Image (cartoon, helix red, strand yellow):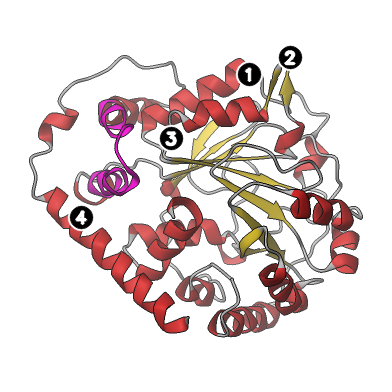
């Protein structure tokens, strides 16, 4: 099993590089020769980027994922266009839990804390014109989102017509029947610890996972000061659950906006990474790449923050760090492994390419 996984990573990286090299030898100037009408945006740099990428995205919409992603790499690496790969799309701040580590449910009473259907469709269209490939709906709790007769399921179906892959991150307390390509369920430890951190929700989540028919469910585990020692127990639990395909991890980030400070010390983070690497080596389904996990200890990895684009419930679209429009950026405290993996994939690091393929494209 371990040998095959390593060989799969090498094979996938070789294929990706081959396609990328072949595409760079082709004549591609005509793909960007025409200009297209644009939706209004307040950001001139985003408007210019939309003009350059709209036609290419329309042409790639009908292609399989491999040439689509090769086209993305061609634009980023050869044409030096700062098009985003991944969108973090917050449809609402409303949530049915009050998780200790999260500041977003505290914003429920703010103006524009929930997006309308029209605003969501307009934001998705802007993301499409920018060349975004992957969209992840989140919250708050995204499955609570409603606007008249519309619910999140309708947004997901609309997005799937326009993007390579669409995912949802949920707290798992509602039925897991959303038609996304990938579905992440947040679980922050075993029953007792999770219940302390996430409003006593473990049994509801377990019931929904057991009854789920979704083909691609992952657990997302945010390690913090109170739960990191349960990584091994949770990994073993995930492996035994037939409806779960694996788990991803990230590290608590201190927004300092009313949430509990659950930051790991540097020594705790180092010990947590060591434990995660041991679990991967033993064959447990921890799907983060080893190289990026190691880099999270000191946060010395090369960050391409413009590979991410953020949409907030008020309709604001911001390209860059996940925290850019949501708090104060503290790079030394970063725990956002998805951005680390996406940055690694842009640098053609095999482990990050393989992780992305497993989670979104496989």
Residue annotated with mark 3: 163
Residue annotated with mark 4: 19
Image location of residue 50, percent across then percent down: 34, 27
Residue annotated with mark 2: 148
Q: Quadrant of residue 304?
A: bottom left
Q: Quadrant of residue 192?
A: bottom right
Mark 3 and mark 1 in contact (Cβ < 8 Å)? no
Between marks 3 and 2, how big is the CA–CA gap? 24 Å
97 relative to 2 in the view: left or right: right
Circle 1 Cα neighbour tier, 10 Å, few/some/many (<14 / 14–19 / ≥20): many
Point out the tag, 1 or 4, that comes first from the N-terminus.
4
Q: Secondary structure at mark 2?
A: loop
Magenta-highlighted residues = 55-75
**In the image, what residue occupies the spot 38% across and 60% down?**
345
Compare residues 327 and 77 and report the one nearer the observer: 77
Mark 2 and mark 1 in contact (Cβ < 8 Å)? yes
291 relative to 350 in the view: left or right: right
Compare residues 131 and 187 and report the one nearer the observer: 187
């Amino acid at each position: 099993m371990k040998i095959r996984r390593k060989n799969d990573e090498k094979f996938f990286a070789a294929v990706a590089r081959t396609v990328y090299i072949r595409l760079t030898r082709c004549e591609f100037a005509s793909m960007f020769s025409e200009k297209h009408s644009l939706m209004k945006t307040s950001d001139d740099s985003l408007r210019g980027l939309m003009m350059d990428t709209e036609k290419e995205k329309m042409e790639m919409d009908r292609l399989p994922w491999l040439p689509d992603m090769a086209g993305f790499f061609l634009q980023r690496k050869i044409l030096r266009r700062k098009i985003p790969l991944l969108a973090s799309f917050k449809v609402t701040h409303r949530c049915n839990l009050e998780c200790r580590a999260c500041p977003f449910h505290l914003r429920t009473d703010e103006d524009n804390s929930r997006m309308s259907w029209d605003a969501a469709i307009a934001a998705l269209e802007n993301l499409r014109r920018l060349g975004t490939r992957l969209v992840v709906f989140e919250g708050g709790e995204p499955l609570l989102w409603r606007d008249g007769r519309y619910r999140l399921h309708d947004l997901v179906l609309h997005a799937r017509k326009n993007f390579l892959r669409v995912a949802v991150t949920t707290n798992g307390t509602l039925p897991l029947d959303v038609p996304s390509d990938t579905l992440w369920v947040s679980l922050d430890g075993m029953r007792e610890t999770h219940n302390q951190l996430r409003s006593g929700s473990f049994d509801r989540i377990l019931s929904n996972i057991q009854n789920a028919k979704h083909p691609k469910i992952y657990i997302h585990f945010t390690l913090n000061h109170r739960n990191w020692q349960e990584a091994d127990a949770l990994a073993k639990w995930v492996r035994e659950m037939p409806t779960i395909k694996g788990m991803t991890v990230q590290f608590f980030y201190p927004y300092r906006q009313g949430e509990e400070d659950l930051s790991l010390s540097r020594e705790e983070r180092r010990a947590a990474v060591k434990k995660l690497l041991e679990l991967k080596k033993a064959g447990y389904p921890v799907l983060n790449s080893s190289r990026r996990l190691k880099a999270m200890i000191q946060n010395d990895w090369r960050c391409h923050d413009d590979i991410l684009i953020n949409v907030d419930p008020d309709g604001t679209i911001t390209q860059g760090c996940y925290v850019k429009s949501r708090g104060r950026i503290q790079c030394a405290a970063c725990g956002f492994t998805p951005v680390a993996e996406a940055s690694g994939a842009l640098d053609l690091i095999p482990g990050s390419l393989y992780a992305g393929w497993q989670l979104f494209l496989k």
